[in-house]
Amino acid sequence: MQLQIDSIDLKEPAFAPIVSEIAKAIEEAKELAKTRAELPRYMNKQQAAKYLNVSYNSMVDNYIRKHGLKVIIVEGVQRIDKRDCDELMERLKQ
């Protein structure tokens, strides 16, 4: 059996919930991208948690302690590089 669809009219009432969910997902993705772009390259732990879209506790317990996210310490000031966050996420990707 083969299914072929030549066109779909997303203005049909039956598609309204799907279109609404897609629009919501797009807006959330845009907001997250904007937030991530506004953060500095070298972030404090709270900013890094926001960048990774996780709680502060998850950042410290899981990402830093469990998975070894690198923390830069200069004269007691702790910073986390965006690139290290991205590398960790790539490494953890399944």
Image (cartoon, rainbow, N blue to C red):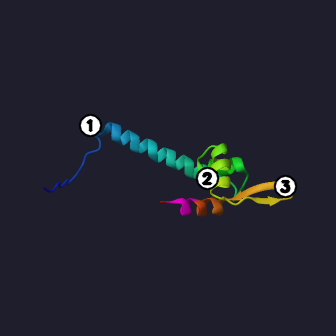
Q: Are marks 2 and 3 in contact (CB under 8 Å)?
A: no
User: Mark 1 vs mark 3: which is more N-terminal?
Assistant: 1
Is 8 on the left or on the right of 27, as rendered?
left
Q: Give the residue at x 62% y 57%.
A: 67
Discs 2/3, front: 3
Residue 33 within the magenta-colored segment of the rendering: no
Q: Around disc 2, counting alpha carbons within 10 Å, would you say few (fewer than 14), some (14 to 19), or many (20 or more)?
A: some
Secondary structure, mark 1, is helix
Q: Give the residue at x 19% y 54%.
A: 6
Circle 2 residue: 36
CA gap between label 2 and label 3 equals 25 Å
Amino acid, disc 2: Arg
Residue 88 image position (x, y, % from top left): 60, 61
Amino acid, disc 1: Ala
Q: Give the residue at x 54% y 59%.
A: 92
Image quarter of the N terminus: bottom left
Secondary structure, mark 3, is loop
Circle 1 residue: 14
Residue 21 image position (x, y, % from top left): 40, 41
Q: Are marks 1 and 2 in contact (CB under 8 Å)?
A: no
Which of these two is toward me, 34 or 2?
2
Check the image and report above or below for 59 versus 92.
above
Q: Quadrant of residue 18?
A: top left
CA gap between label 1 and label 2 equals 35 Å
Please give the range of residues in magenta: 89-93
Q: Mark number for residue 76?
A: 3
Amino acid, disc 3: Gly
